[in-house]
Amino acid sequence: MKKLLFYLLTFFTFTGNIFAHEFWLAPQKYSWQSGEKLWLRWQVGENFRGDNWSGSREKALQLRAYSNIYSYDLLPYLGNAKGDSAKLDTIKVAGNFTIVYQGKNSFIQMRADSFNAYLKEDGLTNAIQWREDNHRDTSIGRELYQRSAKTLIRTKSTLRKSDFLKNSFFVIQSGLSLDIVPLDNPYNILQPTKMQFNIYFQGRLLRDGLVRIWHKLNGSTTVKTTQVIKGVVEADIEPNGEWMISLVKTEPLKDNAIADWHSYWGSLTWGY
């Protein structure tokens, strides 16, 4: 155990902060013709602009594509080299698909001031209050973190725009630790529309939390923050550009020799 702890602290200790870094799935594009090659990238960065992650297949627990009637295991397409993307043969069936990724736990350690700033930035008031109440707000932050990411794509079997099926996306939970589920198909809207999304944590509707709504259009990115209310988030969505919904949830750990906290990072992306 001591050797394992030394290994983790040696390779995953940071003195900077990560609170501005999001993690998301980024396909080359979101609408595909059947038979095209689809490159799926994992991105990490700030302001909805990222670089390829440093992970590989060994970091992944799950990579699947779901529709209302189909399910595909995509994990074999993810390479073993760090920073790999997944090169996929486009799903041959026309329709709407949700691609989901679940990562394994990783460890990070931060200075107290960086950790406190990260907690504040992401609205993790439960952790802030606990650290203050237990006189730990000047202690280093030792955290296990897990990433859950989803993206919405659509495929068609002809060149007609109308060939995109109008059915909804896979709108039930997909087994992710932190799961963002659209209650309607965002690709069906023709004008700015208020949409709702369910937020699940460990299989149950999340009571509250801070959520970011990102919109990237013509090289410019805007972000709005909103609150989860009884498991639901509402957002004003326009049918243009790229979109991402992201949030973080953290829980205290007991009797853990490596970390004091476990955080869960979730995101959902789609684009027009």
Image (cartoon, rainbow, N blue to C red):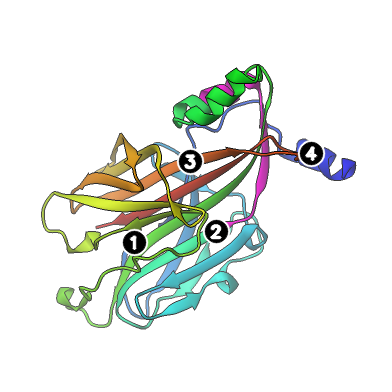
User: Taking the image as drawn, is residue 32 in sight?
Assistant: no
Instruction: Give the Cα distance between marks 3 and 2.
Output: 14 Å
User: Would you say the residues marked 4 and 3 are in contact, meaning their CB atoms lie under 8 Å apart?
Assistant: no
- Taking the image as shown, residue 36 lies to the left or right of residue 52, namely left
- Residue 17 lies, with reference to residue 169, above or below; the image says above
Marks 1 and 4, how far apart at CA: 43 Å
Q: Earlier in the sequence, mark 3 or mark 2?
A: 2
Q: Secondary structure at mark 4?
A: loop
Q: Amino acid at mark 3?
A: Val
Q: Secondary structure at mark 3?
A: strand
Q: Up-down: is 72 above or below 124? A: below
**Which marked residue is nearer to the observer: mark 4 or mark 3?**
4
Q: Residue furthest left?
A: 191
Specify the segment rendered in magenta.
Answer: 102-117
Identify the residue shown where x is 15% and y is 75%: 162
Q: Which residue is mark 3?
A: 248
Front position among marks 2 and 4: 4
Which residue corresponds to the image point at 48% horizontal and 28% vertical from the top-left?
A: 125
Residue type (three-letter) at the residue carrying disc 2:
Gln
Q: Amino acid at mark 4?
A: Ala
Separation of residues labelled 3 and 1 (CA atoms): 26 Å
In screen coordinates, is 162 left or right of 247? left
Q: Nearer the viewer, mark 3 or mark 1?
A: 3
Q: Residue 152 appears at what percent x and percent y?
A: 35, 62
- Left or right: 68, with 55 as reference point: left
The quadrant holding residue 5 is: top right
Whether residue 211 is in magenta: the answer is no
Q: Position of residue 79 (x, y in %)?
A: 61, 66
Q: Give me the disc on residue 29.
A: 1
- Residue 103 location (% of width, % of height): 59, 56
- Can you tell which quarter of the image residue 167 is in? bottom left
